Amino acid sequence: MAKLTHLDETGAARMVDVGGKTATDRKAIATGRIIMSAEALSALTGSDSAKGDAIAAARIAGIMAAKKTGELIPLCHPLGLDAVALDINAEDGALRATATASLNGKTGVEMEAMTAVSVALLTLYDMGKALDRAMVIEGVRLLHKSGGKSGEWNAASSS
């Protein structure tokens, strides 16, 4: 049976020791979306928004958050990321954020990709809440990870 890696044999929280691991190329892709009214969607995707380019602001916020994941999630290692890319696209009644984080290192970047998505979506909520306080952030999840001892993993398709 698998065990939680962030708990020691007594059940106490601990940071995983990655000192003996070999550095490998690692990549993670995460996604999530924010559902909103047509009015909010139009305002957030329009270049005439009173708050400026909301998509650009959310993209920058997500990238900045990925770089600070080790400060936000208590047992995450601080990582020197090689790259973080964040795409935000309109869907029917929603905006979808998809982040890709990568590095050559001793631990994965799944948390960085999911943090980027989460903060980008929270930024969009903040910028659009005057028009729609009922927006819903949903489906933040890992789509793909590669590298390290466990190799490649891909999420099962979902609708």
Image (cartoon, rainbow, N blue to C red):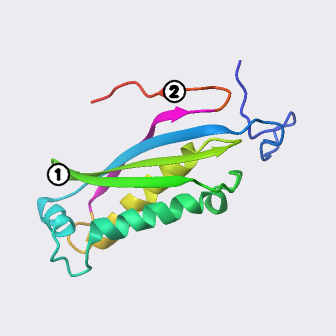
Q: Quadrant of residue 22?
A: top right
User: In the rendered structure, does residue 11 fall within the stretch colored magenta?
Assistant: no
Q: Quadrant of residue 86?
A: bottom left
Specify whether 105 is left or right of 83. Answer: right
Q: Position of residue 92 (x, y in %)?
A: 15, 47
Q: Position of residue 83 (x, y in %)?
A: 51, 53
Residue 139 in sight from this viewpoint: no
| Residue type at numbered disc 1 | Gly
Furthest residue to the top? Answer: 1
Residue 142 in sight from this viewpoint: yes
Determine whether the residue tagged by mark 1 lies in a helix, strand or loop: loop
Q: Is residue 123 above or below residue 69?
A: below
Q: Residue beneath label 1, please?
A: 93
Q: Position of residue 36 (x, y in %)?
A: 21, 57
Residue numbers of the magenta segment: 134-147
The quarter in which the N terminus is drawn is top right
Q: Residue beneath label 2, please?
A: 153
| Residue type at numbered disc 2 | Trp
* Contact between labelled residues 1 and 2, with CB atoms less than 8 Å apart: no
The quarter in which the C terminus is drawn is top left
The crowd level at tag 1 (other Cα within 10 Å; few <14, some 14-19, many 20+) is some
In the picture, the disc for residue 9 is none
Taking depth in this image into account, of 84 and 6 the one nearest to the observer is: 84
Q: Is residue 49 above or below residue 39?
A: below
